[in-house]
């Protein structure tokens, strides 16, 4: 069974590595913060690892979203994007010309 082109781990490899590393570090920090007693000088540092692990997992979630959205293909072709961009540029030019041509009303009080 052959896969279509562009499916799999072909795009956004850096973001994929980032997301996997943040997952590993985040889960490790959470587990160490929960199960290992970390007292240094009478202070407990377990909460620090819990919060930093949760932050790393949140960052990894952003990485997974970026990786997944970077691997979506076939939604809009390149021609459609340039066509839409040209339409938006024409609309912006038309609106700016109309704004420039409008006479400004002065409010005079009598």
Image: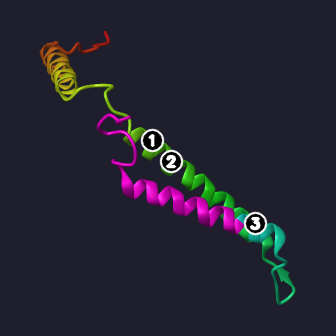
Q: Which mark is residue 31?
A: 3
Measure the C-alpha gap from mark 3 to mark 1: 27 Å
Q: Earlier in the sequence, mark 3 or mark 1?
A: 3
Q: Earlier in the sequence, mark 3 or mark 2?
A: 3
Q: Residues within 10 Å of mark 2 (few under 14, many from 20)?
A: some
Q: Which residue is mark 2?
A: 64
Measure the C-alpha gap from mark 3 to mark 2: 21 Å
Tell which of 1 and 43 is nearer to you.
1
Residue 95 figure quarter: top left
Tell me the residue at 53%/63% (across/down). 21
Q: Which residue is mark 1?
A: 68
Q: Quadrant of the C terminus?
A: top left
Per the rendered image, the range of residues in magenta is 1-29
Question: How far from the left and from the top, in percent, is residue 15?
Answer: 42, 54
The secondary element bearing badge 2 is classed as helix
Kindly check if marks 1 and 2 are in contact, taking CB atoms under 8 A apart as contact: yes
The secondary element bearing badge 3 is classed as helix
Question: How far from the left and from the top, in percent, is residue 89?
Answer: 17, 24
The secondary element bearing badge 1 is classed as helix
Tell me the residue at 47%/60% (across/down). 18
């Amino acid at each position: 069974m052959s896969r279509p082109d562009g499916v799999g781990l072909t795009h956004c490899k850096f973001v994929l590595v980032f997301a996997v590393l943040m997952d590993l570090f985040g889960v490790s920090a959470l587990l160490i913060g929960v199960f290992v007693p970390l007292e240094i000088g009478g202070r407990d540092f377990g909460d620090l690892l819990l919060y930093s692990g949760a932050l790393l997992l949140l960052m990894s979630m952003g990485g997974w979203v970026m990786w997944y959205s970077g691997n979506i293909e076939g939604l809009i072709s390149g021609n459609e994007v340039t066509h839409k961009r040209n339409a938006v540029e024409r609309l912006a030019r038309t609106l700016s010309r109309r704004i420039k041509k409008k006479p400004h009303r002065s409010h005079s009080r009598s």
